[in-house]
Amino acid sequence: APVVWSPATREHDPRHEIWVGVATQGTEVATRVDVILQALRDAGHRLVEAPGHGDDVLRQVHDGELLEFLATAAERWAAGPYAELVGQDRVVPYLFPTPAMTAGLPVRRPVSVHADAGRFAYDTMTLVGPGTWEAARAAVDCALEAAALVGAGERLAYALCRPPGHHATPAGFGGSCYLNNAAVAAEALRGQGHERVAVVDIDAHQGNGTAAIFYDRADVLYGSVHVDPGAGWFPHVVGYADETGVGPGVGATRNVPLAAGTGDGPWLAAVGDLAAWVAQAGCTALVVSLGVDAAADDPESPLLVTHDGYRGAGTVLGHTGLPSVVVQEGGYHLPSLGTLVAAYLDGHAD
Ligand code: SP5
Ligand code: ZN
């Protein structure tokens, strides 16, 4: 399958993230691109560098204010007094002007970028610095190019998107995600004339961003298998089995939470259920949010899925027969990351 990537996706390299109040080593690092590229090159895939695409589809997915913030935050921070003072080149949200703070009062736009960040950031781990916007925007170009290749007749195209996207909501960023690459791919496929598109998310975490973007829509189905947020896992507050859509989107969302330590069997059964669901619902194109952080060695989840499990998930989703855009999401164990992606694509192409 063609592997669409962009060197600009390396430009975002968070050295640290603020987790429970401490600066810990970032997990969503630029090296991820290189280990995936190497494994896919070794597996004989054709590499395609993504050309630039316009903003039209991106603007269908995200609010203009979020895009404007992300595009300008690093410069605003660098120009202010604190970047040098604290020795941090990334904007860390400082306060959150949510209803908890403003409680019905008229809310003004904060002048300071570290206060402004709290309008869009929903966690303290996902920082914006030099190169963040360029990389996130290049990841969107990868998703758009992969969708274009499928539109031109490829049955399967893989977008090496990084930073990942499935936690990015219409007007918010978090969970190491800034722009929702999978949602952009789904909208691009809709724009090619597919009346009903499915997003199946097999990242270890529920993609609250993608879920939110399509929650009230019948034309894009969202199905996810993930570690149970009710057991204390990210994104904590959503991703429960009883969230099934609203309004015209009733029945078009499906969440399958799994217990820690579940392994290949129940995980593959859930992937199989989601595949059968989207095929039976009359979808004519598929986006796969491929996180490989459900794998056994991954530091960010306890699901214990193996290489064979990922190959099996590829086989199951490939057997839907739907033209597919596979978008990279999480996966943080550098020694196995690339071969897990290769195993999935091997199964899907089968
Ligand atoms: C795309 C994706 O997989 N995002 C992951 C979001 C979940 N991150 C939760 C982080 C929990 C704390 N991890 C400790 C990190 C230490 N640096
Ligand atoms: Zn994840």
Image (tube, rainbow, N blue to C red):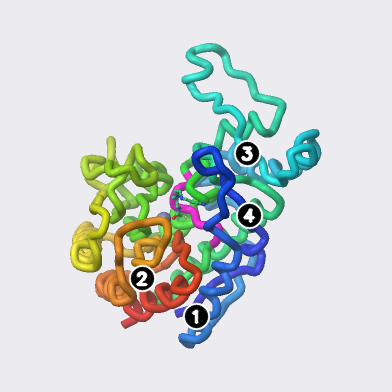
- For the residues labelled 1 and 3, the Cα–Cα distance comes to 34 Å
CA–CA distance in space, label 2 to label 4: 37 Å
Label 2 and label 1: CA atoms lie apart by 23 Å
The three-letter amino acid code for the residue at tag 4 is: Arg
State yes or no: discs 1 and 3 in contact (Cβ < 8 Å).
Answer: no
The CA span between labels 1 and 4 is 24 Å
Foreground mark, 2 or 3? 3
Mark 3: few/some/many CA within 10 Å (<14, 14-19, 20+): many
Q: Is residue 166 magenta?
A: yes
Q: Which residue is mark 1?
A: 39
Q: Which residue is mark 3?
A: 92
Is residue 268 positioned above or below 98 on the image?
Answer: below
Of circles 1 and 4, the one toward us is 4
- Tell me if 34 is positioned left or right of 88 in this view: left
Q: Earlier in the sequence, mark 2 or mark 3?
A: 3
Residue range in magenta is 162-168
Residue placed most toward the observer, 317 or 34: 34
Amino acid type, residue under disc 1 in the picture: Ala
Earlier sequence position, callout 1 versus callout 3: 1
Q: Considering only order in the chain, which callout, 4 or 1, is on the residue closer to the N terminus?
A: 4
